[in-house]
Image (tube, rainbow, N blue to C red):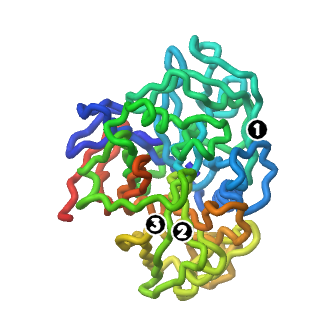
């Protein structure tokens, strides 16, 4: 569910991945990559997300923990993704990797993988690359990756881990990653790592390299640039926050259950001003690696029942809902603290074809879908997935100690994009 170039600090443009003067705090530029036909890619995105969190049986070769139903992995072939530039090897080779709080492993396509990615890691050119020779295959809804467990020097945002474990991928299902993407950097906890490895961010924390035990995201809203393969994406800050990108003070909520996914409980929800019951099971994974919001079947049906003219889609779009494109769908959500409003623009994923819907009016796909009811075993398996449909509306902070997630209203920050340089405008009030 999800590599990004763009840097922030007050009102100044920044070059890609330029270190900031704050010791132990780095602001990493991120880019949002958008596809021209994002609605057509929704079925694959939905299927991969269901399998990622164990809502459907999977033939995954490797599963790390009993309380997860499948290997946590992300499908990038959906409407968009966020990625960051990660350097691997000695001398360094640079790659755009999806930044995903819903998984915990680092993997990259290698040159032994024929036509897997536009940019591939040439392991023979790295003097610090070491392969264990242990094979690992990860299967999920829309494909698989397989390769060898290895380690190498990894640098991201000015921070370096010299023996970072990763999967050197030699085979990827066609279409699994697209454009300039070369793999995934997982930002979850080590307890759900398929590699049984410490994720890069957690290794930084364990080595006391971060000023604060956290990282934070500002995710930009989509900007329609049809001729561009990359659009402004936002900022990932390692070891701190960027107060120019949010209003007021961060509101922290303790994680629900032991550290695995970044988990909170959905406390309340409203649609078009009407309260919707969140159901008896409301555990939610906060996941930068997916575009959508996934809700249990009965809740999803109740959500869309509040929107006049909406309908459940069928066939390959089963689980998704459509609504009249002229309707603004207004959703609010709370995780036990403040109530956050989702911009109607984020609830509209684009128009669908007349063959997908029999409605007389033009219909658009909605940003909340039915993930199903069959979940994996264990007490900490999420039944909700909260993706970028929500996260674009807040500044989000992921804190390791004490373990918590923080939110605050995000500023309408991005104003200009040109050659990976950006200008910003300040928040207006608190």
Compared to residue 329, the image places residue 1 above or below, namely above
Say which residue appears at 55% left-offset and 27% top-offset: 164
> Marks 3 and 2: CB-CB under 8 Å?
yes
Say which residue appears at 32% left-offset and 30% top-offset: 18
Considering only order in the chain, which callout, 1 or 2, is on the residue closer to the N terminus?
1
Report crowding for label 2: few under 14, some 14 to 19, many 20 or more residues within 10 A (C-alpha).
Answer: many
Depth check: 103 or 204 in front? 204
Task: Identify the residue position indicated by label 2 in the image.
Answer: 367
Quadrant showing the C terminus: bottom left
Task: Identify the residue position indicated by label 3 in the image.
Answer: 346
Q: Which corner quadrant of the image does residue 427 belong to?
A: bottom left
Compared to residue 104, the image places residue 55 above or below, namely below
Depth check: 368 or 199 in front? 199
Residue 335: where, in percent of width, then height?
Answer: 44, 69
Distance from Cα at disc 2 to Cα at disc 1: 31 Å
Q: Which corner quadrant of the image does residue 16 belong to?
A: top left
Number of marks in picture: 3
Tag nearer the camera, 2 or 1 = 1
Residue 233: where, in percent of width, then height?
Answer: 41, 48
Say which residue appears at 55% left-offset and 64% top-offset: 284
Task: Identify the residue position indicated by label 1 in the image.
Answer: 137
SS assignment at label 2: loop
Q: Which corner quadrant of the image does residue 204 belong to?
A: top left
**Can the viewer see residue 179 in this picture?**
no
Considering only order in the chain, which callout, 3 or 1, is on the residue closer to the N terminus?
1
Task: Point out the residue furthest to the right here.
Answer: 59
Compared to residue 388, the image places residue 106 above or below, namely above
SS assignment at label 1: strand
């Amino acid at each position: 569910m999800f590599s990004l170039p763009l840097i922030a600090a007050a009102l100044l443009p920044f070059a890609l991945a330029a270190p900031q003067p704050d010791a132990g705090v780095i602001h990493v530029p991120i880019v949002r990559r958008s596809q021209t036909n994002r609605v057509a890619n929704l079925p694959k995105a939905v299927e991969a997300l269901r399998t990622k969190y164990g809502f459907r049986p999977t033939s995954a070769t490797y599963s790390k923990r009993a309380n997860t139903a499948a290997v946590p992995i992300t499908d990038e072939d959906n409407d968009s993704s966020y990625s960051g530039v990660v350097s691997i090897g000695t001398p360094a080779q640079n790659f755009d990797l999806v930044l995903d709080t819903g998984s915990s492993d680092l993997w990259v396509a290698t040159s032994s993988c024929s036509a897997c990615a536009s940019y591939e890691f040439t392991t023979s050119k790295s003097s610090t690359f070491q392969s264990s020779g242990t094979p690992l295959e990860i299967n999920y809804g829309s494909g698989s990756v397989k390769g060898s467990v290895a380690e190498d020097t990894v640098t991201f945002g000015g921070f370096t881990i010299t023996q970072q474990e990763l999967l050197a991928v030699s085979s990827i299902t066609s279409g699994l990653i697209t454009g300039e993407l070369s793999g995934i950097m997982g930002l979850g906890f080590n307890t759900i790592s398929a590699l049984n490895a410490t994720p890069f961010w957690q290794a930084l924390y364990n080595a006391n390299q971060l000023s604060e035990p956290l990282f934070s995201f500002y995710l930009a809203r989509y900007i329609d640039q049809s001729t561009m393969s990359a659009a402004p994406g936002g900022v990932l800050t390692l070891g701190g926050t960027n107060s120019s990108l949010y209003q007021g003070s961060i509101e922290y909520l303790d994680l629900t259950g032991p550290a695995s996914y970044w988990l909170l409980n959905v406390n309340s929800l409203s649609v078009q001003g009407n309260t919707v019951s969140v159901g008896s099971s409301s555990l939610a994974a906060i996941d930068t690696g997916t575009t959508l919001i996934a809700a249990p079947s009965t809740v999803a049906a109740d959500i869309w029942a509040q929107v006049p003219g909406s309908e459940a889609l069928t066939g390959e779009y089963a689980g998704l809902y459509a609504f009249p494109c002229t309707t603004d769908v207004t959703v609010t959500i709370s995780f036990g603290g403040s109530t956050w409003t989702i911009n109607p623009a984020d609830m509209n994923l684009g128009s669908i074809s007349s063959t997908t819907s029999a409605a007389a009016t033009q219909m658009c796909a909605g940003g909340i879908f039915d993930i199903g009811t069959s979940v994996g075993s264990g007490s900490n398996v999420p039944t909700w997935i909260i993706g970028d449909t929500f996260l674009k509306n807040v500044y989000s902070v992921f804190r390791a100690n004490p373990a918590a997630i923080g939110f605050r209203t995000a500023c309408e920050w991005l104003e200009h994009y040109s050659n990976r340089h950006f200008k910003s405008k300040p928040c207006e009030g608190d």
